Amino acid sequence: MRAPSWFGIAVIVWLLGEVCALALIVHVAGWSGAILLGVLTSLAGVVMLRQTGLGAARGLRRALNGENAPEGAMLDGALAALGAVMLILPGFLSDLVGLALSAPSIRQFLAVRFGARATKVGMQRDGVIELSPEDWRRVDDRPESRDRLPRHG
């Protein structure tokens, strides 16, 4: 007889964790509360997946217009979509993982942990903010120019 694979053991541990989480939620909130909570987290997952899809469509539109996507945007989007799917799946342990993946800081941590260069949108690692020409304007802040400003009052 073969020894169980790591994947098989992980699935069994996951299922046992889901049963324990369900028992805990039923103990705290009752069956109707557990069902309501499960439905609400699934709906939240559907909304989150829709927003992730819309964001991906906007990114595709930008790419078709010749704009470059921020570094790590693809991995961040994939992790957000995975979080949404985890929320949709039945089970409170998967909901916990889905909620964790809905947080940008957790997704950024995972991206860095797995070797991707994750950056905030529009922010480079060296602290330089890249803006498009429509997002900024020049302001003359020299001392002599402030003396020439019209005074109100």
Image: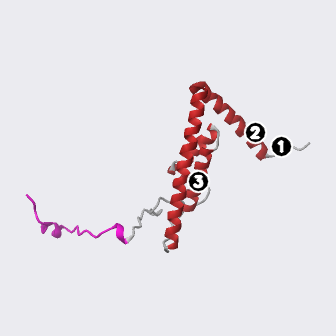
Element type where label 1 sits in the image: loop
Q: Nearer the viewer, residue 28 or 11?
A: 28
Q: Nearer the viewer, residue 102 or 10?
A: 102
Determine whether label 2 and label 1 are within 8 Å by CB: yes
Could you tell me the amino acid type at mark 2?
Ile
The answer to which of marks 2 and 1 sits earlier in the sequence is: 1
Residue 13: percent from left, percent from top: 73, 38
- Residue 137 among those drawn in magenta: yes
Q: Amino acid at mark 1?
A: Pro
Q: Which residues are magenta?
A: 133-153
Query: What kind of secondary structure does the magenta stretch mostly adopt?
Result: loop
Residue 62 in view (yes/no): yes
Q: Is residue 43 above or below residue 76?
A: above
Residue identified by numbered label 1 = 4
Q: How busy is the neighbourhood of tag 2: few (under 14 within 10 Å), some, or many (20 plus)?
A: few
Q: Is residue 51 magenta?
A: no
Asked if residue 99 shows in the view, the reply is no
Mark number for residue 12? 2
Q: Which residue is mark 3?
A: 81
Q: Pointers 2 and 3 in contact (CB under 8 A)?
A: no
Q: CA distance from mark 2 to mark 3?
A: 24 Å
Give the mark, 3 or 1, whose residue is nearer the N terminus. Answer: 1
Residue displayed at 60% across by 33% down = 35
Nearer-the-camera pick, 140 or 52: 52
